[in-house]
Amino acid sequence: MQDGDYNVLFGRPKSMKTWVLLHCACHAYNYHNRRVLIYTREMTPDQIRDRCACLLLNIPYSAYRKGKLHEFPCPSGRGTLEQRFFELVEEMGDDEKICKLETGYDKGLIITSDREDPHGGGVNGLRQKIEDHEPDLICVDGMYLMRNDRENRRSVKWNDQYAISQDMRDVCLDTNRPLLVTTQGNREGKENYEEGTEDVAFADSVGMDCTTLIKIIKKRTEDPEVNELALLIKASREMNMVGFAINGCAAANFDQLMQKCVNPENNQVLKDDEGNILYEPIVFRDPDQARAMFKKQKAEEKRSNPVRALDQRMFSKAQRKR
């Protein structure tokens, strides 16, 4: 993410958009000592804080949510994950001060909202927070829930979303800082793996204004704690790429999803000199490769719910007659 970039993550509800945004924010904070502003419209600051703490520790969010962190030993061998969780929250401030003294980086993870302000929630309010905190990276969760400052209203109508997106682009250019936001995808574009901006919900302006537009599609696995995510580059000014796949295990694993290396001539799995199987990241060379990632899941869903599959076939038949 470069200064002045306006990057958008979008997808259908519950596709882990917020998790991916927070993973990027925590990575910039933890590994690059950056000052990160997280502005939340979808969740409370406390909820975002807890998710970030789990991400920084790479611990299962489900264990935290169910109050079971005390049952897991800390990988360092010192106490439990519950103890380490509260230690981290207490130590972050001191670590940031030490980082500034030793490296000069004004590291910080600032989580904010303005729901308490009846006139807040717009891009102007975000600008004020940027001026107050001077972040290196700006993250906005739920851009579509922001207020249109031009008309002083909050709405998902296309003209209001158009104004919000344009104003967010101006924020990038005026502050010369990278902006990463989440928004929704429309229902009609759920099965769309092709390049293009038409499956962003509410307004076309988002696709026109942004630097990079990334669609997130979630694939469930047999393990309820493990998801796989396809990230499709639907539009970009700076690169030519179809997409790639990552793990989506909240909050323990968002690394790249790997696959076995195969010789294309004979389809044999490649191994190193010691006989260990070689792996490579899953990178989509064309939309069909991304589509194939979800074919097996769809077939299993139809087998597990034959009534629903029958309803869909009857609906399609009725549409054809009409």
Image (cartoon, grey):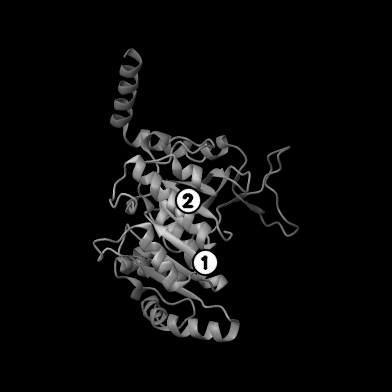
User: Which residue is labeled 1 in the image?
Assistant: 27
Q: Quadrant of residue 44?
A: bottom left
Q: Nearer the viewer, residue 151 or 111?
A: 151
Q: Position of residue 113 (x, y in %)?
A: 33, 65
308, above or below 4, in the image: above
Q: Position of residue 223 (x, y in %)?
A: 41, 53
Residue at 35% of width from left, 72% of height from top? 69
User: Which residue is labeled 2 in the image?
Assistant: 8
Residue at 43% of width from left, 38% of height from top? 199
From the viewer's perspective, is the residue at label 2 or at label 1 nearer? 2
Residue at 55% of width from left, 58% of height from top? 4
Left or right: 229, with 48 as reference point = right
Q: Quadrant of residue 308?
A: top left
Q: Amino acid at mark 2?
A: Val
Left or right: 49, with 103 as reference point = left
**Structural crowding at the residue carrying mark 1, measured as other residues with C-alpha within 10 Å and reported as few (<14), some (14–19) or many (≥20):** some
266, above or below 135, in the image: above
Does residue 238 show up? yes
